[in-house]
Image (cartoon, coloured by chain):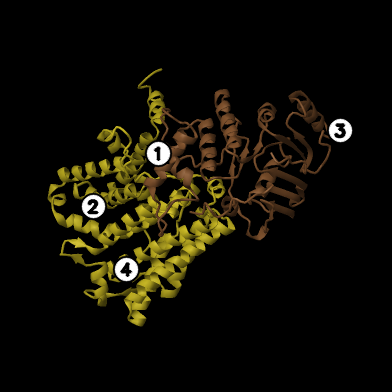
């Protein structure tokens, strides 16, 4: 927050702190980690579990950050799992056929951009609702990846210990996975794009009301295409992180990312109605989602509880955001359950 | 930044439409509109729903493109191919729509600058500067003192009149020469309406022109220098302030609705060339 320094100087700290971006979800995150530390100290008081989170969460985090902007614009993208497959394939083919993983990174990003441009074109120019277009393109690109790879997987063991592995997947000083640093850098950069860049402001106004944005002189069509392209490029980057970490490409590698990444965005407090979004919230929301499974298992609860608990956390978090954002809801809710009568 | 693009040259009409027609498919929304607005004139635009008021405004401000006709801005012919909302902004036209002028969930400072942000050369917004100017607009231009509104207020927390005030203040800040108000008092409480009418007066006193679309005849009759009546896409009357009382005007419009030949308006002409230099 930039200071305004009105006469009267430092307003008290408390209200300011309360307005801090993503505060409710940061509290939930801290409480959850605290709970796991108490319930499973042998696991959660050691570094290895966090090392594991910092390795597995980053691809999902990169996707969720891109999605945050898409949702901020009042749109949705369901095609990113296919980007993981398609861009992963492009990366893998460049490595195995051309022996150039760096070219593979470029190809993965370009492939993601292509997917994004196509999505953006159909949403912004043709006017098909994004939820429908991206269901279609999800099938199409996932299918394309399967066709091109013949449904095969590619072992990429030769990359282990290579320069590109050190850049994207090795552990810095043996304790900090590189992909977590990449994801953090992208989160910070995208925070500035969303909150401090002209493009981010346009995205927020488009999500708020397309008519208002257009009247204000925002080129809604062009900005929407840019937005989906950005999402595609981030998806391509997530594919690179994922493929290098696994040292393997398989054509179904995007499966299982759709709902967790979306859940991370909404747990974080980004409004499904568009016009408001929080990167900080998405950051912690995604880590909560990424942490729950291991956490629940480590506490000794049987594994098949995991999804049910994830569901409870999701609904609780989204409800919490709603109540924090509009106190009126809280009042009507307490009236409804009869806690208070007027 | 692009504030000094239009040179402060002498001109007679801020905007002049010549024989503008517009059809949506088979529907004729505008038919042969001739209208000229002087440089410091408040022109009230009245007419029934569907008379073409909003369409005319949209054509003048580059939102829609007419099927035929010419447009002159500051007496210079406009090329339709390069005319757009952005271009209209650059030519210092500003439209305040009934409700769709402000982003509800966004803070006030973003609303003032959206589309015209103060940025560095990488496109990052200079937030501190935008906030400061926004607060300045609130205090100096709009006199929002001690009402608990500042640059960080979210639009959804403001009253209807305050919102119109913000939109008008924004227009004046960007030094618009023509401010178009699309039913600014609709759905407002009476006390709020008074505020908005004061904002409209401040447009006139600051030397700008204004096109004021209004349903409430009393409001527009009180404020406008000239009233232009639209009916089914045509201008049917062009009345100077003082030529008709409110009662006569009301009767004239009712007769018009009944489809009667209605006798022409006192200006007695389809063409709007009666524009005075204000």
Q: Are marks 3 and 2 in contact (CB under 8 Å)?
A: no
Residue behind mark 1:
B152
Tell me whether marks 4 and 2 sit on the same chain. yes
Answer few, some or many: residues within 10 Å of disc 4's Cα (few below 14, many 20 plus, some between 14 and 19).
many
Viewer-proximal residue among A118 and B149: B149
Q: Which dot marks residue A243? A: 4
Write down the colour of chain A.
yellow
Name the residue: 65% across, 49% down.
B10
- Of all chains in the rendering, the one displayed in brown is B
Looking at the image, do the residues carrying marks 4 and 3 touch, with CB atoms under 8 Å apart?
A: no
The residue sitting at 37% across, 46% down in the picture is B128
Task: Classify residue A160 as left or right of residue A122.
Answer: left
Front disc: 4 or 1:
1
The residue lying toward the viewer, choosing from B26 and A311, is B26
Q: Verify CB contact (< 8 Å) between mark 4 and mark 2.
A: no
Q: Is residue B94 above or below residue A114?
A: above
Task: Residue A147 in the image: state x and y as whole percent.
Answer: 45, 73
Find disc 2 in the rendering and name its residue: A294
Q: Earlier in the sequence, mark 4 or mark 2?
A: 4
What residue do we see at 50% from left, 37% from top? B166
């Amino acid at each position: 927050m930039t200071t305004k320094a009105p006469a009267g100087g430092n307003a008290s700290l408390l209200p300011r702190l309360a307005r801090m971006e993503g505060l409710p979800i940061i509290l939930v995150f801290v409480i959850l980690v605290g709970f796991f530390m108490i319930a499973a100290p042998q696991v959660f008081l050691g570094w290895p579990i966090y090392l594991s989170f910092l390795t597995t969460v980053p691809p999902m985090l990169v996707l969720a950050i891109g999605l945050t902007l898409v949702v901020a614009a009042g749109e949705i993208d369901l095609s990113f799992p296919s980007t993981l497959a398609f861009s992963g394939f492009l990366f893998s083919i460049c490595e195995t056929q051309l022996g150039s993983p760096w070219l593979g990174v470029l190809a993965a990003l370009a492939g993601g951009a292509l997917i994004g441009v196509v999505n953006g074109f159909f949403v912004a120019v043709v006017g098909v609702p994004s939820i429908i277009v991206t269901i279609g393109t999800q099938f199409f690109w996932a299918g394309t990846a399967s066709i091109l790879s013949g449904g095969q997987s590619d072992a990429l063991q030769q990359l282990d210990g290579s320069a590109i592995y050190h850049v994207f997947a090795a552990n810095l000083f043996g304790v900090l996975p590189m992909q977590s640093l990449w994801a953090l850098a992208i989160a910070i950069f995208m925070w500035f794009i969303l909150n401090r860049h002209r493009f981010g402001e346009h995205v927020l106004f488009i999500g708020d009301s397309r008519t208002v944005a257009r009247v204000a002189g925002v080129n809604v069509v062009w900005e929407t295409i840019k937005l989906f392209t950005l999402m595609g490029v981030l998806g391509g980057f997530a594919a690179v992180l994922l493929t290098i970490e696994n040292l393997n490409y398989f054509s179904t590698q995007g499966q299982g990312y759709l709902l967790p990444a979306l859940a991370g965005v909404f747990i974080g407090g980004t409004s499904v109605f568009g016009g408001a979004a929080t990167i900080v919230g998405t950051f912690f929301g995604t880590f909560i989602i990424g942490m729950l499974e291991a956490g629940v298992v480590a506490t000794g609860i049987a594994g098949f509880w995991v999804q049910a608990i994830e569901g409870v956390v999701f609904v609780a978090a989204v409800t919490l955001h709603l109540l924090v954002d509009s106190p009126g809801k809280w009042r009507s809710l307490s009236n409804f359950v009869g806690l208070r009568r007027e | 930044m692009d504030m000094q693009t239009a040179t402060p040259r002498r001109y007679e009409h801020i905007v002049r439409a010549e024989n503008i027609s517009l059809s949506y498919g088979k529907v004729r929304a505008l038919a042969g509109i001739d209208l000229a607005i002087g440089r410091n004139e408040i022109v009230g635009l009245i007419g029934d729903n569907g008379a073409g008021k909003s369409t005319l405004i949209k054509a003048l401000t580059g939102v829609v493109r007419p099927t035929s006709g010419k447009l002159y801005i500051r007496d210079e012919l406009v090329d339709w191919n390069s005319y757009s909302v952005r271009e209209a902004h650059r030519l210092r036209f500003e439209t305040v729509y009934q409700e769709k002028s402000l982003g509800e969930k966004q803070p006030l400072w973003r609303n003032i600058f959206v589309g015209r942000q103060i940025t560095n050369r990488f496109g990052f917004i200079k937030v501190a500067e935008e906030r400061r100017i926004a607060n300045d607009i609130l205090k100096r231009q709009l006199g929002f003192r001690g009402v608990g509104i500042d640059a960080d207020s979210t639009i959804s927390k403001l009253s209807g009149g305050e919102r119109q005030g913000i939109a008008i203040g924004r227009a004046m800040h960007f030094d618009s020469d023509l401010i178009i108000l699309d039913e600014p008092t609709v759905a407002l409480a009476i006390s709020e309406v008074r505020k908005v009418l004061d904002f409209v007066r401040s447009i006139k006193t600051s030397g700008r022109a204004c096109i004021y679309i209004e349903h409430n005849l009393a409001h527009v009759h009180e404020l406008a220098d000239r009233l232009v009546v639209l009916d089914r896409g045509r201008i049917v009357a062009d009345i100077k302030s003082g030529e008709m009382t409110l009662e006569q005007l009301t009767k004239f419009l009712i007769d018009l609705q009944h489809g009667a030949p209605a006798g022409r308006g006192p200006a007695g002409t389809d063409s709007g060339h009666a524009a005075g230099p204000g």
